[in-house]
Image (tube, helix red, strand yellow):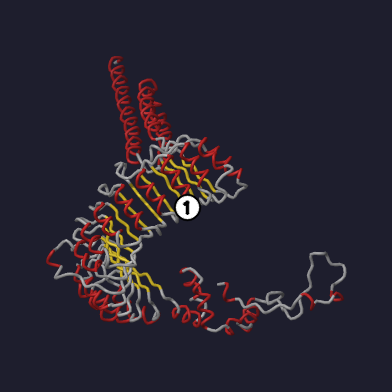
Amino acid sequence: MAFLFKIQPMAPLSAVKSDNWPENQPPSFRPPLRGFTPPCMGQSASSRLLTLSQSRDFTDDLPDECLALVFGSLTAADRRTCSLVCRRWLLVEASCRARLSLHARPSLLQAVPPLFARFDAVSKLSLRCSRRTASVGDEALALIASRCPRLVSLKLRSCRDITDAGLDAVARHCPDLRKLSVSSCCFGANGIDLVLRGCLLLEELSVKHLRVLHDSAAISGPIAGVTTLRTVCLKDLYNAQCFAPLIASSPKLKTLKLIRCSGDWDPLLEAMAGKVPGFAELHLERLQVSDRGLIALSARVDLEFLRLVKTPECTDAGVAAVAECSPRLRKLHVDGWKADRIGDDGLAAVARRCVGLQELVLVGVNPSIRSLELVATNCGSLERLALCGSDTVGDAEIACVAAKCTSLKKLCINGCPVSDQGMESFVSRCPNLLKVKVKRCPGVTPECAERLMASRSGQLSMNVEPVDEGPDDEQRIVAAIDEVEIQESNSGGRGIEQAVATAGVITTIWKRRCATMKMRSGLIAARRNVVAFAIRKWSSQWRTILRLVNAEYEHGR
């Protein structure tokens, strides 16, 4: 409620005369400035509120456009707070809100008219729903589309009750739509086709987890192509081949991402050659694609970003063909899946031709010092380097990187046989290095990180994550269980207390192991088994003691 207090302007310090300074006052005393009357000194609560209400609101002089710029720099929570200050702020905040995210529940249908009467300038809308509950239907989506004619971005997440009719309404009412992202919905390719035909300015299309796309009856024909489409992302689709005509007939396409989609994608890459002259980024992850498609596409396209993740049919030949025809390549991500199909030959070709390379990520690839030296020597603009899961990257290779990569700013090493000796090569080298992350490298210690950061006078950030210590934890749990059994056989009635103490030790181990999120269920089961075993053992011992007492009592009688 701080916005309710209106503070009057204070006079400058030059307005306070020296002769106004009271005598015999401590140095901390400050006389009231001329032109400023404290509203809270010597006033009752009612008079204080009256003074505040009579003070002037200086935001009245601020135009609505400037106030909207201020609101645009705030977070969503702060904007909601500002909208409660006064009616003017409520109207200005609503009129300048361009982004809106809503829970797409069936009850949203009744709230659409008043909601979009207030937020009449929304241009980016996101409708999200849980997969376990019902969502809005075609009627609600059609009503929203009619209230948002200036919509340029639409995201639908888990809206299972929306069909092709709802997308048809979007195509009719939102002709300026430029971005469409759908995920885990139940409409098919026909709905996407309706949007493409009605929204001729569409630039970005993202389709993920469509449930009925595998139904051949839902596909009446090839999806129409649009001349403005620039980005296409297809993920986890069974029959994603129906989008091939759309991709091949988009002359302004720049980015294509294909992730875990079934089918052979070499014919698509061959069809794209010569039809997408401005194509720049290609992301292929877990696909059936080979060197044939890469060679055909790279012959007619100059790529700037290539990402190959777990594509076992792609080899050094495909990477070398891309490097030969794409001298402007800036980013290269390769996850070789430890198949040894991409190695020194492909990296050497990249080093010779792509001298402007800025980012290189190698996962599951085993490069030698020869190829790394070529990359470090020829690619003088290399700023980001990641080496993960490589058995051949050791201290010698890291020392070569430190000596040659003078422009390196970020370095990530994960699961490589590197030690402190190799990391200390960066003490006096790579002057532009800002961030280093080392994970699962048992030879690198936190002390090395401290020495390295101290040598850079605090200008370097280095994070060393220790190796997972799961086997040691398992051995401690087994030892704790054995200890419970030994103590239970010798402790009598105190067994339950010792069992609880031992369970506390295992609980401590479990909390520490939760940081890695591995063995979580095993540790919980072990803890339950220990406590249950102790209780059962204690109960059986007490039953034995009671039987002995009863027997002695009967014998005494």
**Picture residue at 33% right of the left edge, 74% below the top:** 178
Residue 502's place in the image compared with 315, above or below, is above
Q: How many marks?
A: 1
Circle 1 Cα neighbour tier, 10 Å, few/some/many (<14 / 14–19 / ≥20): many
Image quarter for residue 57?
bottom right
For the C terminus, the image quarter is top left
Image quarter for residue 483?
top left
Q: 344 or 195: which is nearer to us?
A: 344
Q: 484 or 472: which is nearer to us?
A: 472
* x, y percent for residue 141: 27, 75
In the picture of the structure, the residue carrying the numbered disc 1 is 382
224 sits to left or right of 435: left
* x, y percent for residue 353: 40, 53
For the N terminus, the image quarter is bottom right
| Residue type, label 1 | Leu
* x, y percent for residue 80: 47, 72
Residue 543's place in the image compared with 305, above or below, is above
* x, y percent for residue 8: 67, 79
Is label 1 in a helix, a strand or a loop?
A: loop
Q: 208 or 498: which is nearer to us?
A: 208
Residue 508's place in the image compared with 111, above or below, is above
In the picture as drawn, the residue positioned furthest to the top comes out as: 555
